[in-house]
Each structure stands twice: as C-alpha cells, then as structure tokens.
Amino acid sequence: MKELLKKTKADIAKDLREKEEALRAWRFALSGAKVKNVREGRAMRKDIARLHSALSMKSE
C-alpha cells in the first residue's frame, strides 16, 4: 500500500484500468474453461480494491 501511495493519481488510474481489463479477460477465459488457476481472479479483485482505496486516499 505504501508504494501505491507514492504514485501519482494518473499512474494509479492507469494501473486500475489495466487490472480491470485483465480481470475482464480472465473472466472470459474462465467461462471458456481455459483457466486452471481460479485463485488468480481473487488476487486480481483484491488488487483492484487496493487501487480504488489508494485512489480515494489520494483525492482526500
């Protein structure tokens, strides 16, 4: 979390868009039964939540 707070709001927003796109691609792969590691989705969702938290802390 500390390294996220060192980034600028633009960098955090860019990372957030990339993670959300990766999660969407992962979900499509999951529906096609191409994903073997289902825990990967949980980790991506937690990363997205961390980015949202850091972004809201930056805007305060």
Image (cartoon, rainbow, N blue to C red):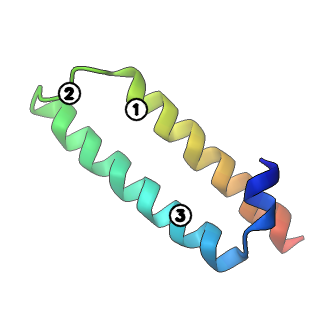
Q: Quadrant of residue 27?
A: top left
SS at mark 3? helix
* Residue displayed at 47% across by 29% down: 42
Q: Is residue 3 above or below residue 44?
A: below
Q: Secondary structure at mark 1?
A: helix
Q: Which residue is mark 3?
A: 15
Residue pointed to by mark 1: 41
**Residue count near mark 3 (Cα–Cα under 10 Å), binned few <14, some 14–19, many ≥20:** some
The CA distance from mark 3 to mark 1 is: 16 Å
- 47 w.r.t. 41: above or below: below
From the viewer's perspective, tell me whether residue 46 is left or right of residue 2.
Answer: left
Which dot, 3 or 1, sits closer to the camera?
A: 3
In the image, what residue type sits under mark 1? Gly
Contact between labelled residues 2 and 1, with CB atoms less than 8 Å apart: yes
Q: Residue at x 45, y 54 (%)?
A: 19
The disc placed on residue 35 is 2
Q: Position of residue 8 (x, y in %)?
A: 73, 75
Residue 39 horizontal/vertical position (percent)? 41, 21
